[in-house]
Every structure is written in C-alpha cells, then in structure tokens.
Image (cartoon, rainbow, N blue to C red):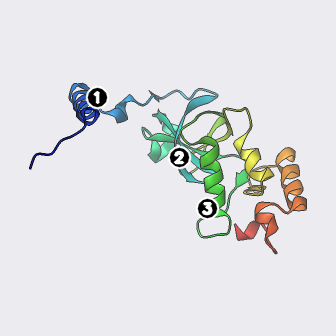
C-alpha cells in the first residue's frame, strides 16, 4: 500500500528540515541578549507565570538578575499582588494577564530594581498604551501591594474596585490576607 502526502505537506517539511540544518545557531541564542538594561525594556512576552509575573524574550546578563542571569527576563509587576495558585481568582488573573500581553510586544518601565528571585520590578505598558498593573487592580484581579507601594493612584483604583464589587471584591470577606 502506498501512502500519499499532499504536496504542501512535503514542501513544508522539506523547508523546515532545510531551515534547521542551515541554521548556524539555536533559536534560543537568537533572543536579544544584553548586560545593559534599557528603560523602558521593549520585548515580546513569551511566558506568563501568574497574574503578576511575566517573562520576556530578552536575555539579561547583568549581575542584578542573580540566579536568572542569562535567562529570559522575568518581570514582577510593581504595585500589585494577584491571587496565588489555589486561591479564588488565581486562574482569572493569570488568564487576564495572558490575554492582554502574551506574544505581544510590551514596554516595561522600571527603576532598575530586582527582587530576591531575580525578577525586574516594573510596570507593563501594553500595545494599546494602558498599564497592565493598573488594569488588574481596576478589574478586581489584583490588590494594591501596600507592603511595597505607597502609590496613591493604585490605592484609589483598589478602593473603586471594592466599591464596585468586581473580581475578588465580589467574594464575601475578601481581604489582602487571603491572596
């Protein structure tokens, strides 16, 4: 019995094999790499760890990144805290973050500060100009992280979301300690 493949399938795989064989460097090494951290950092989002942590297609080799030196740059969203795994709205917050920025080019504004996990602390400017950090709080998918931020705008966004009972604030008895 003879198996027949459509012509486009054969052409596709022939092209793919040709690309792989002629590529002199692995794709991982084609990611922009730098020991200098531009401000803002502009790169494609290639990973969503949770609602308040994303990963960029940018390898930072600077010492401040700690154990993440030379790995794709992780960003911890400044001013906000999303629900942790297993908590109400964890999946909703992660999905919201993914819908807004995954596989899109974003700008990360920052002050060059990293947390103890080697994540750059910053605000994510989405392609439409909105700030992801603020959108999460506005939609009740994050709280203002008062332990590390005294920003009045984030505080006001949280107060408004509480009054409107959106997202986490629609649940009875929600407070920072439950995240």
CA neighbours of label 2 inside 10 A, class few (<14), some (14 to 19), many (20+): some
The residue most toward the front is 1
Judged from this view, the residue extending furthest toward the left is 1
| Mark 1 surroundings: few (<14), some (14-19) or many (≥20) residues within 10 A | few
Secondary element type, mark 2: loop
**Residue at point 72% right, 52% down?**
80
Single out the mark in the foreground, 3 or 2.
3
Q: Is residue 51 in view? A: no
Q: How crowded is mark 3: few (under 14 residues within 10 Å), some or many (20 or more)?
A: some
Numbered mark located on residue 91 in the image:
3
Q: Earlier in the sequence, mark 3 or mark 1?
A: 1
Q: How far apart are marks 3 and 1 (CA)?
A: 36 Å
Tag of residue 118: 2
The span from disc 3 to disc 2 (Cα, nearest Å) is 24 Å
Judging depth in this view, the residue of 11 and 38 nearest the camera is 11
* Nearer the camera: disc 3 or disc 1: 3
Horizontal side of residue 83 vs 166, given as left or right: left
x and y, in percent, of residue 165 in the image = 85, 63
Residue 76 point in image, percent of width and height: 62, 47
Up-down: is 72 above or below 177?
above
As drawn, the residue found furthest toward the bottom would be 173
Mark with earlier residue (3, 2): 3
On screen, 25 above or below 91? above
Reading the image, the residue beneath label 1 is 25
Quadrant position of the C terminus in the picture = bottom right
Element under disc 1? loop
Q: Distance between the residues labelled 2 and 1?
A: 27 Å
């Amino acid at each position: 019995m003879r198996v027949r493949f459509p012509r486009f399938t054969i052409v596709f795989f022939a092209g793919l094999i040709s690309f792989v064989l002629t590529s002199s460097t692995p794709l991982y090494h084609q990611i922009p790499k730098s020991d200098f951290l531009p401000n803002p950092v502009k790169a494609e989002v290639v990973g969503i760890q949770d609602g308040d942590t994303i990963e960029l297609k940018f390898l930072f080799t600077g010492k401040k990144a700690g154990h993440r030196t030379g790995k794709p740059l992780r960003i911890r969203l400044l001013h906000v805290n999303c629900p942790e795994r297993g908590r109400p709205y964890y999946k909703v917050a992660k999905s919201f973050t993914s819908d807004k920025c995954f596989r899109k080019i974003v700008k990360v504004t920052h002050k060059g500060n990293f947390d103890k996990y080697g994540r750059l602390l910053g605000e994510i400017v989405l392609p439409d100009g909105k700030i992801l950090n603020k959108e999460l709080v506005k939609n009740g998918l994050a709280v203002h992280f008062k332990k590390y931020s005294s920003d009045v705008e984030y505080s006001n966004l949280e107060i408004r979301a509480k009054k409107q009972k959106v997202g986490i604030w629609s649940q009875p008895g929600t407070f920072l300690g439950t995240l």
